Amino acid sequence: MSGGRINRDGYRHYTGALLSPESRFWVVFEQQLFWVIRNRRARLLLLVALAPMVVSVIALMARMGGDAAGFSTDGFVEEMLKGMLIAEVHIGAFIAAAAGSGAVADERRTNAMLLYLSRPVCERRYLLAKGLAVASLLFVAIALPGLLFVVADIMVVANINLAMTGRHALGIVALGALVGTAFGSTVLLFSTLAKRAAYPALAWLALFYFSGMLVGMAGLAGDLDNNLSMLALPILIHRLTSWLVEGVGGPAPLFAALCWIALVLGLLVWRSGRLRKLAVLR
Amino acid sequence: MNAPCLTFTSVVRRYGPVLAVNDISVSIGGGITGLVGPNAAGKTTFITLAVGLKRPTGGQIRVLGGDPWSDLGVKGQVGYCPDGERLWDNLTGLQFVVTMAMLSGVQKDQAHGRANEILVQLGMGDAMERSLATYSRGMRQKVKVAQAVVHGPRFLMLDEPLNGIDPVSRHEIMKYLRQLADQGTAIVVSSHVLHELDGFVDSVLLLHRGRLLASGTVEEIRDLIYEHPHTVRIETPDVKGLARWAVDLPGVMAVEMEDDALNVRTRAPVELYRTLPAFVMGSGVRVQSLYSTDSSLEAVFKYLTKGDLR
């Protein structure tokens, strides 16, 4: 069977400049983002994510009407912004489930992952590109409504404190980035463990909400000063939002969130080494 | 520069206790090579090893001189068409092929032109802007072939690209692949049906239970098939007349008559196929159909493995 030889005459190999490995990373990113945007459930949830902002802006405008009649807005904007952001984060948990649960699981089920991995794309870049796509979407879903609220705040409230408003904006961007990365990478990690999108979605939502229940059952939920209470994701989000938006509490929730992200990214890198093993199973 | 595109040296691949590829040593050069075997013969494992999706448990694999598992440069020069039909259904055929071209490193502006050109060559010009979700099985196979060749690979591995598609699509895919092979691309095509590859491939590798059972040209493999006893079924209203003719043929071992058909067991089926038309023309006997009941690949494997088929 060694008689044949490569005949290079008339050879049609691509001879143009090759995209760099980084550019191929962005091709995977773009593909995943495109997939999510075409996903009806994810689109619906992105629209739902605007609802808390719309309600908050209407409430703010109504309050300003009352303020003209002598009511104060002190602390009102912070309370409203914090409540709105926590609502956004809860919706974000569902967006993460819709956008990230099938990122790897569906491609394993349909064998489409083989197409990626047979290309000159390394597994780590493949996973990180997908994670970044989901995280970016979550960032937009959480930070955009928050920033729109800040704009409405500037336009509606007279004698606005610009320093405080700037802090709000920075806090919103930081919260969007942290929550987007944490949620996106966790759901993606779960997605590498399953062959159907439903399982990682359910596992993620169970982790998110049952962790709160379990911490509550352990008697830690009532004591918000106890750092162990942050084992409950809703409590961690609550404390993180309070610290970023209102400046209430210490930076412990930030460290907790960063530890969570580091742990999940480490596990993702470990999983990337097993992707080719998973890819061929049918 | 002359070199084999793919070299397996004592390659072994285990899945736990299952030996999917068992000590295969083979070298594949240019042209089209058929990788043939029944289900679970190890064809897909062979291909996934060659494209670097699996690492061999033992032995060494070289594709275009490099290790397909660790050398991303090799992957850029190999095209791969996996088995299975489901793709990214949210994309159009053109978007899908452009994406795959870019993943192989083709620049975006050129990827679009190349994808467009290949899809037109494969007869997908009218359908390329439609969503993949609307594609028939044959169209999906064509798009999968297009994504495998869009970056102009030197070596192409196609896992059952002709499986379950209509004759027109099959013909178009085979014609296109033949053109590519004539232009210098080395191609490996797997199938579990030998006759599917007849007249299309230049050489054949027969796999069975992970072992390389036989290799050679299609003619050599066909001779191998014809060397073992064959049963040919001839459906005719004149069973007795045909039976009298058949028993005198060289190589005939047994003749079994039914109401409207004759089963001829012979060691020389070629002789039967060669002389039957003249007999029919001369005698006026009507023959409604003629086919071999065991010229399938399973029968060949049964013969080669002395009946040791799972």
Image (cartoon, grey):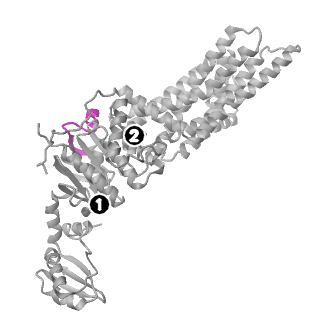
> Is residue B61 rendered magenta in the image?
yes
Regarding mark 2 in the picture, which secondary structure is present there? helix
Q: Residue at x 86, y 18 (%)?
A: A66
Residue B55 seen by the camera: no
Give coordinates of residue A69: x percent, y percent. 89, 15
Q: Residues within 10 Å of mark 1 (few under 14, many from 20)?
A: many
Q: Is residue A147 above or below residue B232?
A: above
- The residue pinned by badge 1 equals B192
- Residue A18: image x %, image y %? 30, 28
- Horizontal and vertical percent for residue A170? 61, 15
Asked where in the image residue A31 lies, by quadrant, the reply is: top left
Residue tagged 2: A275
Quadrant assignment for the C terminus of chain B = bottom left
User: Is B194 on the left-hand or right-hand side of A226?
Assistant: left
Counting labels gives: 2
Tag 1 and tag 2 share a subunit: no
* Magenta-colored span: B54-74
Chain letter of mark 1 equals B
- Quadrant where the N terminus of chain B sits is top left
- The reply to whether the magenta stretch includes residue A164 is no
Residue located 25% across and 31% down the image: A15
Q: Cα distance, mark 1 to mark 2?
A: 28 Å
Mark 2: amino acid: Leu
